[in-house]
Amino acid sequence: MCEAVIFLHYMQITTIIENFRLIKFLVLLFFSLTVAACGGDVSSIPDKPISPGITDPLPELRILVVGQSISSNCNEHVYGAVNNVFQIAKDGSMKAASDPFEWADCNKGSMWMPLGKKIIEAGIAHKVVFMPIGVGSSKVEDWQTGGAAFSKLNNAIALIQKQGITFNLAFWHQGSSNLGMNQTAYVNRVGSVLDYVSSKVAIERWIIAVHSRCGTIYDQNIESAQLALGGMSELKRYPGPNNNSLGNEYRFDNCHLNQSGQEKMASMWLESIKAVLK
């Protein structure tokens, strides 16, 4: 009698296991057929995301921009709105971006509208939010305590803190106004500005552009300083695009960018972002 009961339980368990295997097989078969029907390749589906922008786009990428005129809507071509590209407005709200940005110093065009579009098209993020607070002709010392841009910087910081905004990236795009400053002094001054901002605002990474050319001005020491700053990964500072590499065919006044230059710089910023997010 006992043996019969044991045998009966054994048969019931076996049946359950076989049913589970059948269900698992059917689920896997359905999944495979669905992927194939959609043009997919089951073998290419990764076990986990490889990196942001490749298989796992960020829901939102937030970017703070500090710099001088080229970073602050002083370029030639004015861009309209782009789907899912936003800005932090002066009242702290998030609204659709278009040129000129609310915090910008000039009322012309930017690199940021085409960059936002390229970021989304590259699969890096579903949504891009910019906050460009650049000041035309600003020197690095203008961003330090008592400088001409320091009040604007602190107003932006106060709003960021009030709204609880954090940034994935911050760009530094300044330099040509500091013609003649030695390399060490520039590195130290920029470092102090970045440290100050980072002490007030949550920023994951800084990207440092090379920019020491405007018109007939070109300063090798400033360029070298910017390359050095971009090599400080231990401080979460990484290399950005080289604006100096763009010839006059990319500029409308030998300094600020025309539409080709804006598109080119946007592509260069995109490559820098990809490298940082690897």
Image: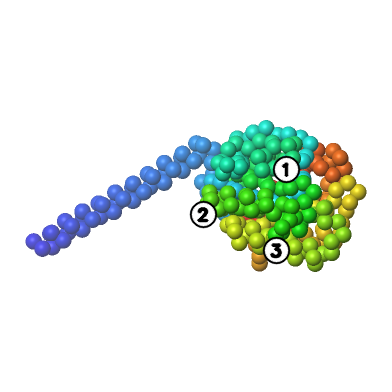
Of marks 3 and 2, the one in the foreground: 3
Give the number of marks: 3
SS for dot 2? loop
Name the quarter where the N terminus is drawn. Answer: bottom left
Seen in the picture, residue 278 relative to 130 is either above or below; the reply is below
Location of residue 81 by image quarter: top right
Residue 163, image x, y percentages: 53, 49
| C-alpha span from label 3 to label 1 | 23 Å
Comparing marks 1 and 2, which lies closer to the viewer? 1
Using the rendered image of the protein, determine whether residue 242 is visible from the camera's viewpoint. Answer: no
Element carrying mark 1: loop
State which quarter of the image contains the C terminus.
Answer: bottom right
In the rendering, which numbered label is found on residue 105?
A: 1
Q: Of 148 and 171, which appears nearest the observer?
A: 148
* Residue type, label 2: Lys
Element type at mark 3:
helix
Say left or right for 38 vs 227. Answer: left
**What amino acid is found at the position of numbered circle 1 in the picture?**
Asp
Tell me the crowding category of disc 1: few under 14, some 14 to 19, or many 20 or more residues within 10 angstroms, Cα based. Answer: many
Identify the mark nearer the N-term, 3 or 1: 1
Residue name at image x 31 percent, y 50 percent: 20
Dot 1 or dot 2, earlier in sequence: 2
Q: Residue furthest left?
A: 1
The residue lying at 70 percent from left, 42 percent from top is: 104
Q: Position of residue 112 (x, y in %)?
A: 69, 42
Residue type highlighted by circle 3: Ser
Q: Nearer the viewer, residue 141 or 212?
A: 141
For mark 3, what is the residue?
192
Q: Which mark is residue 48?
A: 2
- In primary-sequence order, the first of circles 3 and 2 is 2
